[in-house]
Image: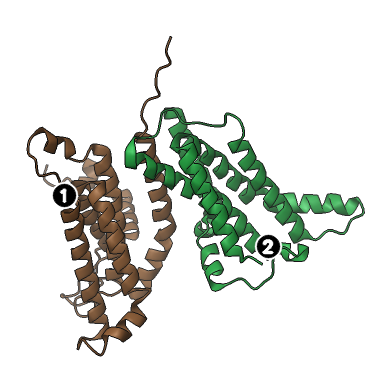
Amino acid sequence: MVPVEVFAIVLWATFVFVGLSREFPRELGATIGFVTMMLVLDLGSERFGTLAQRGLTAAGFSPDLSLIKWAITTAIVTLSIILMYQGEGLIFGGRSAKGLLGSVFNLVIGVLNGWLVIGTWWYYTHQLGYPIVKLGWFTPPISALAQRLVSMTPMAVIPDEQSGFYLTAFLIFLIVLKVAR
Amino acid sequence: MSGTTPFAMAGLSLHQAAGTVFLLRQVLGGPEVSPASSAQDIVLGPLLVLVTIVGFFAFLGFRGGVRRQALTLFLTALVYWGTTTRWAPLAAQLAPHIPVAGARLQGLIFGGGVLLSHFLGHRLVSAPSAAGAKMVQSLPSLLERLMGLTLGGATGYLVGRFSLLRLPTGTITLVGPRQDVQDILESQAPNVLWLVIGVIILFGVMSLRPKKKKDG
């Protein structure tokens, strides 16, 4: 079975390649959607999970709360990726800079988006105690490297009590840039 | 003008002025003199020292531009990694050959490494030898200078982080207790990270070229 950190790094690398091919203006537009996704998860993941559990219990099922929360988190992350990469999407005006400078920015924005999306998904999976174990998709324990990488994900880096402030400020900053451009 | 304080000139009452000074001291951490300390004690807030170091390296980055500073930062980060994370095995290898105490050797290697990084950054990525218009064209643009400023600040952060945790505390106290320094560095890390991300995005947007005009 592939270690979870290898899986996450491969997915992250995919975002880097996407960043290089789609280029900075398109990818920065996608960043707005990904930060919104993080804000939604930060504010609502707990409530979504509880609501879904109540609904399923009322329907006669006996669901596992952590597995439901993980499924909802994964669904929100997947939905945001589809929304940001399907169709026109949000695009910043202008073209990437020529030469090495442009390539560096394309690379950096791919790295950033991968960190935001994969890092957020991994953070919540870790916080929920890897409920995918119950589906047989993952076998604990996780390695020291994985523990270290999880501690460097975006939601782990932001102080818990200020996550809403940080994400809102970052989102406003991106929207102001989009409007100004 | 005699008897008019700068605070009164700025329209602040005595109470507001005292509050402002308190707030500045809380934010910058000093300088402050403890009533119990001797005349030789100089206590500088760690954050003030860190900001000064970051500012100095940011200035160097602004002068040199992004190309030079990128190499300098990369080399400095390597030196930092070697003298902190990888220090234990490295020191064990060096110990039998060099008769210098561990912490001092660590500081010497780091200091030498930072100097070498700057030297290489400014030598290897040099301006073209031809004088005149070509030379003027090769000078870093404002955007390249601003990016150099950011990378220089990051270099300064590494230097400050390394130095602040190792400065001696004695008769002349240059920084507060080590735990305070550690706490400040830890607490500021998310802010620094998000600030750097924001600045990189800003530079990325500034670097965009206008769209091609459609024919017809």
Q: In the rendered image, what is the letter of the chain coloured green?
A: A
Type of amino acid at the residue the image marks with label 2:
Leu
Left or right, residue A13 beside residue B19: right
Horizontal and vertical percent for residue B34? Answer: 26, 72
Q: Which chain's residue wears label 1?
A: B
Q: Residue most toward the left?
A: B131
Horizontal and vertical percent for residue A181? Answer: 42, 28
Q: Which chain's residue wears label 2?
A: A
For disc 1, the marked residue is: B126
Disc ID at residue B62: none
Q: Nearer the viewer, residue A85 or B37?
A: A85
Q: Nearer the viewer, residue A104 or A66?
A: A104
Type of amino acid at the residue the image marks with label 1:
Ser
Q: Nearer the viewer, residue B30 or A79?
A: A79
Horizontal and vertical percent for residue B213? Answer: 40, 17
For disc 2, the marked residue is: A128
Q: Secondary structure at mark 2?
A: loop
Q: Does the rendering let one see residue A113?
A: no
Task: Name which quarter of the figure residue B211 lies in.
Answer: top left
Q: Residue at x 33, y 42 (%)?
A: A100
Q: Chain B drawn in what color?
A: brown
Where, quadrant-wise, is the C terminus of chain B in this rendering? top left
Of discs 1 and 2, which sits in the foreground? 1
Task: Name which quarter of the figure residue B93 lies in.
Answer: bottom left
Q: Mark 2: give few (<14), some (14-19) or many (20+) Cα within 10 Å.
A: some
Q: Secondary structure at mark 1?
A: loop
